[in-house]
Image (spheres, rainbow, N blue to C red):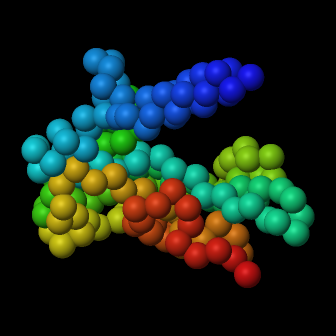
């Protein structure tokens, strides 16, 4: 019995160790994207992002607003396969954004769609190779309008009380 337990434990440790290694497959662009961004002087900004918040007392997810970057200095953004766009560090850029709120099932509510600009200054992105998210608002619930909010996290800046 002891050899079986030892073999099982050794197998589990090997599998866990392999899973913690970075993915170095030739087709995986995410593994080296941060390194490429760091050497090219760019940051990565999610081209589209939706907020949501889990409501523990109701045991369901509240689907918050979605934001999509529709232009970078008036031009259509070049979205990478991973859903991010590259922006130069320490450079002024105007991002055209589109926000839309969602029904309880997560589908968009077309009548709530609005557009607004988000200004990036030379001080906004200082460190190259970093991934950022532009949220439609600071929180997922009890909000009105489109107020783009920059974050390093996929989660809303504030949870709703």
| Residue at 36% from the left image edge and 42% from the top image edge | 84
Q: Is residue 37 left or right of residue 149?
A: left
* Screen quadrant of the N terminus: top right
Q: From this view, report whether residue 153 is shown above or below residue 35.
A: below
On the image, the x and y values in percent for residue 133 come to: 42, 56
| Residue at 70% from the left image edge and 70% from the top image edge | 141
Q: Is residue 131 left or right of residue 19?
A: left
| Residue at 46% from the left image edge and 61% from the top image edge | 153
In this view of the protein, can residue 134 be seen by the observer? no
Q: From this view, report whether residue 122 is shown above or below residue 29.
A: below
Given residues 110 and 128, the one toward you in this image is: 128
Looking at the rendering, which quadrant does residue 151 occupy? bottom left
On the image, the x and y values in percent for residue 124 come to: 24, 69
Given residues 35 and 46, the one toward you in this image is: 35
Looking at the rendering, which quadrant does residue 134 occupy? bottom left
* Screen quadrant of the C terminus: bottom right
Given residues 137 and 13, the one toward you in this image is: 13
On the image, the x and y values in percent for residue 77 come to: 31, 41
On the image, the x and y values in percent for residue 127 come to: 18, 61
| Residue at 22% from the left image edge and 64% from the top image edge | 125
Extreme residue toward the right, this view: 58
Q: Is residue 83 left or right of residue 129?
A: right
């Amino acid at each position: 019995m002891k050899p079986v337990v030892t073999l099982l434990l050794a197998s589990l440790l090997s599998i866990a160790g392999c899973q913690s290694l970075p993915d170095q497959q030739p087709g995986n662009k995410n593994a080296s994207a941060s390194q490429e961004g760091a050497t090219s002087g760019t940051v990565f900004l999610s081209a589209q992002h939706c907020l949501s918040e889990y409501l523990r007392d109701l045991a369901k997810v509240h689907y918050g607003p979605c934001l999509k970057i529709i232009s970078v200095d008036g031009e259509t953004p070049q979205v990478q396969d991973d859903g991010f766009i590259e922006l130069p560090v320490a450079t002024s850029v105007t991002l055209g954004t589109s926000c839309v709120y969602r029904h309880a099932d997560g589908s968009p509510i077309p009548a709530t769609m609005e557009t607004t600009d988000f200004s990036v200054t030379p001080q906004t992105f200082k460190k190259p190779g970093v991934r950022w998210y532009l949220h439609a608002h600071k929180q997922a619930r009890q909000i009105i309008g489109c107020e783009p909010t920059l974050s390093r996290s996929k989660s809303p800046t504030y949870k709703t009380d």
